[in-house]
Amino acid sequence: MRNLTRHFQRLWRLRVTFVAGLIMLGRLRPFLGVVLAQTADSDDSSRFTYNTSASLNVKQVSVTDRDGATIQDIAYTGRPGYDPAICMKRH
C-alpha cells in the first residue's frame, strides 16, 4: 500500500510539473515568433571586419578584484569617440 501511495505522489508531481511547463510555454509564445523570425545573412563575417593596423587607444578606467577574478573597465577608440568595455580575468 505504501508503494502505491508513493507511486501516485510521483505521478501527481509529474502532472504538476507538466502543467507548469505548459503554462510557461504559453507565456513565452509571443517571443517565439521573434526568435524564429531571425534569418542568417549570407555574409555575417562582414560585421567583424576592421582595420587591423589602426590603433585602438585602449584606456583603463578602473580595476576591481572580486570573487577570484579581476574586472577591468576599459574604453577604446570607437566610431564617434570612446566605447566602454569590460575585461574579466580569472586568478
Image: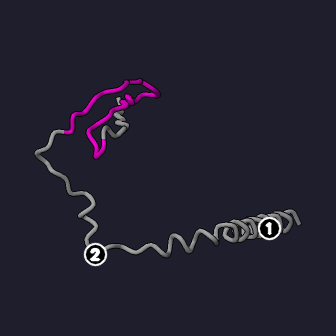
Q: Which mark is residue 63?
A: none
Is 66 included in the stretch rendered in magenta?
yes
Going from N to C along the chain, the mark reached first, 1 or 2, is: 1
Q: What residue is at 36 percent from the left and 35 percent from the top?
A: 88
Badge 1 local density, few (<14 within 10 Å), some, or many (20+)? few
Q: Is residue 30 inside the magenta stretch?
A: no
Q: Nearer the viewer, residue 21 or 11?
A: 21
Please name the predominant secondary structure of the magenta segment in the image: strand
6 lies above or below 56: below
Element marked by disc 1:
helix
Residue located farthest toward the left when viewing the structure as drawn: 53
Q: Please tell me whether residue 49 is drawn above or below residue 44 in the rendered image.
A: above
User: What span is in magenta?
Assistant: 56-80
Amino acid of disc 1: His
Specify the farthest residue to the right. Answer: 1
Type of amino acid at the residue the image marks with label 2: Ser
Q: Quadrant of the C terminus?
A: top left
For disc 2, the marked residue is 42
Residue shown at 28% from the left, 75% from the top = 42
Residue at the spot 40% in from the left edge and 30% down from the top edge: 69
Point out which mark residue 7 bears: 1
On the rendered image, what quadrant is the N terminus found in?
bottom right
The image shows residue 70 at horizontal and vertical percentages of: 37, 28
Q: Position of residue 20 (x, y in %)?
A: 74, 65
Q: Is residue 90 left or right of residue 24?
A: left
